Amino acid sequence: MRLIKSILFLMLFVCFSCNSVKKETAINQSSKFDLNRVLNQNVDKIKTVTQKLTFYDSFPRHIDENNKQWSYVKTKDWCSGFYPGILWYAYEESGDEVLKNKAIKFTETLKTIAYSPARNHDIGFQLYCSYGNGYRLTGKQNYKEILLAAADTLATLYSPKVGSILSWPSQIKRYKHNTIIDNMMNLELLFWAAKNGGDKSLYDIAKSHAEQTMKYLVREDGSAFHVGSFDIETGAFLQGYTHQGYANESMWARGQGWGIYGFAMAYRETGDSNFLNTAIKLSDKFLERLPEDGIPFWDFDDPKIPNAPKDASAAAVAACGLMELSGLVQDEKLKSKYFNAGKKLVEILSSSAYLSNAKNDALLLHSTGNHPKNKEMDVPIIYADYYYMEALLRLNKLENI
């Protein structure tokens, strides 16, 4: 009898173990990153959400805690161009005419920015993400004209004495002539314009701005200041600051991402190896300091880590920059290093820990906007979704070369 009981117990144990293994394997398989599935799900969600939106002068910016729907901003907000850009990316992936028409309507509301006095450096974010993607995908001639006008407007903020664009005219009293690391991203509009019928001086302005940023905002250890302050009259560098990071000398995560992407792009447009080396330096520092789960905290030096908020937007921006960089370096080991690092960030962002799924109308959770001002803390933010979609499309193209 004991023998029979023992045999039965053993059989039950084996069956349970097999079922457990099968269940665990099924879980692992179901959670395996499937690029096409994620892209399709994102496109479907973007289409579902945008069909509910009928006010084309109101642009999604963030989703408050315990809310499911976007909070909106108007045309002049620095984030207004990201939602049209997301729609263009979704159209690029799907070819869906509904998405194209929505992208056109949201994009064309922003035209006024190109022909108004420059309020700040964000013209590139506002118009290159919207009109730039729209022109790339449709070839609309009037989009090209608007982009050229936008580049001329952005160039009015350039100071020959400093050699850089004034990022925030509103902050002159606090920072004098200020140049921020984010501004590297907006140089692409100037580079593009110089190649597409704009004044050739736009290239010189963009290159000079990148050189000054490289010289004064990128620190020896490979991290970056958020803000560089310069004397308005002499152009002399005064001091490095933070505005949205933890401290002046800390490593603000999204700023590091802007630098990686911005300098990789600057090298692509100029061929200046100093920009390439700077992009490599910033990338290596970023990767070296990533936490165990692979997504940066909002600032790498926040003393509250690990009890500090994450910033999915920084990961998405860096993923785009790393994949851009992987196509520019010549060494095969470096190509693999930066491509795999970018892909890994995309895979983690595509996991249940960061995808919002049915929680709300965004794609990603856990971004941090302006921690020092306690604004947009650990919430979905529109530029995280924009660069996440860009990273997915980049990865798809690179894996299908």
Image (cartoon, rainbow, N blue to C red):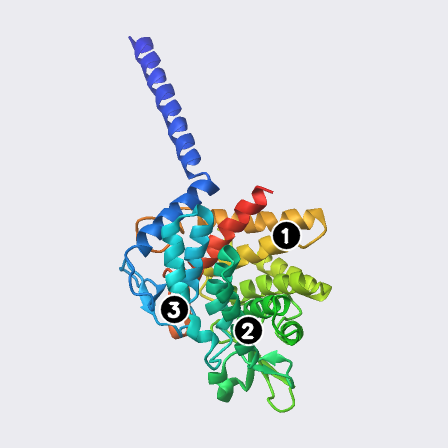
Front residue of this view, candidates 96 and 209: 96
Image-quadrant location for residue 111 = bottom left
Return the residue at label 3: 109
Q: CA distance from mark 1 to mark 3?
A: 35 Å
Front residue of this view, candidates 182 and 106: 106
Amino acid identity at mark 3: Thr
Indicate which disc, 1 or 2, sits on the residue closer to the N terminus: 2
Q: CA distance from mark 2 to mark 3?
A: 18 Å
Q: Which element type, helix, strand or loop, lies under badge 1? A: helix
Q: Which element type, helix, strand or loop, lies under badge 3? A: loop
Quarter of the picture containing the N terminus is top left
Mark 3 and mark 1 in contact (Cβ < 8 Å)? no
Front residue of this view, candidates 203 and 245: 203
Q: For residue 390, which numbered disc appears in the image?
A: none
Amino acid identity at mark 2: Ala
Return the residue at label 2: 151
Q: Which element type, helix, strand or loop, lies under badge 2? A: helix
Rendered position, 179 above or below 108? below
Front residue of this view, candidates 278 and 4: 278
Return the residue at label 1: 326
> Is residue 271 visible to the viewer in this orientation of the structure?
yes
Q: CA distance from mark 1 to mark 2?
A: 28 Å
Indicate which disc, 2 or 3, sits on the residue closer to the N terminus: 3
